[in-house]
Image: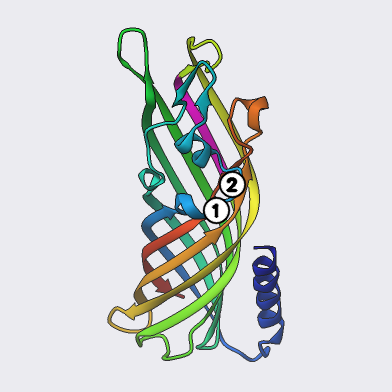
Amino acid sequence: MRALICTATLALTTLVTAVPASAQLVHSLQLGAGLFMPRGLDSRTQGDVLVRNYFGEAIPSLPNFSDALAFDVKDFRGGRLFGEWNIAFGDHVEVGAGLGFYRKTVPTVYLDLVDPRGLEVEQQLKLQIVPVTGVVRFLPFGRPGDVQPYVGAGVSLLNYRYSESGDFIDTNTLDIFSNRYTTSGSTLGGLLLGGVRFPIGGDVYGMAVEGRYQFGAGKTGGIDKGFLAEKIDLSGGELNFSFLVRF
């Protein structure tokens, strides 16, 4: 991932400095919404807290039972909003800076354990990601006013917040207690993207369909903050739809 970030940053810097001063600059504002789909269990970063919660560990006094939680990483699929300001250098190269927002709360219970009354022991897992992105797009075909496919790459500052709240079971004593554990921070990640733009009655307005994949992982603080693993994987795919206006 570090190689991807370095490559994207170098490409962005090279393109901006290499564009002739005579090139026409066209600004555009892009606003939209989409779907964030987190990376699956089999490919998440080592030490990820969601993987630990999903698979659990055996309980010392009940070796045939675990402290696993009943949820799936797919449950964290959710909507996102974003905006981006772009500057085009001619018809085929564009750089942009953007801001996004995603938040999803997933209710869950212990997979194997219940309270003394036989009722589920419930928690809520909440993940929020606010990415600040810098991207460069290559538009090899067409001009504004035409259908324009494109590919690109960039870097993203992933501002995250993750929490677990509700009732928990002490696996040593089997006592049940209520609590809320929260961690937050920022981490640098890489970004790949590709999409197609469609004109709306000329070269000023347009629509875009774009797929992205972001890479990055944050830190939870581990046991010191009440979490059972040290990391939270923030990687995943996006499918975005947006409206574009050029100035």
In the image, is residue 165 part of the stretch drawn in magenta? yes
Kindly indicate the quadrant of the structure image that contains residue 105. Answer: top left
In the depicted structure, whether residue 104 falls above or below residue 37: above
Q: Secondary structure at mark 1?
A: strand
Q: Residue at x 44, y 91 (%)?
A: 141
Instruction: Report the residue marked by disc 2.
Output: 159
Confirm whether residue 218 shows in the render.
yes
Foreground pick, 204 / 194: 194
Residue 23 in percent (x, y) is at 61, 89
Left or right, 167 with respect to 3, comes to: left
In the image, is residue 180 part of the stretch drawn in magenta? no
Foreground pick, 104 / 26: 104
Residue 161 in percent (x, y) is at 55, 38
Residue numbers of the magenta segment:
159-167
Kindly indicate the quadrant of the structure image that contains residue 221. Answer: top right
Count of numbered tags:
2
Q: Residue at x 46, y 49 (%)?
A: 41
Residue 225 in percent (x, y) is at 63, 26
Q: Main secondary structure of the magenta part?
A: strand
Residue type for callout 1? Pro
Foreground pick, 11 / 15: 11
Farthest residue toward the front?
Answer: 64
Mark number displayed over residue 189: none
Mark number displayed over residue 131: 1
Q: Are marks 2 and 1 in contact (CB under 8 Å)?
A: yes
In the depicted structure, whether residue 240 falls above or below residue 112: below
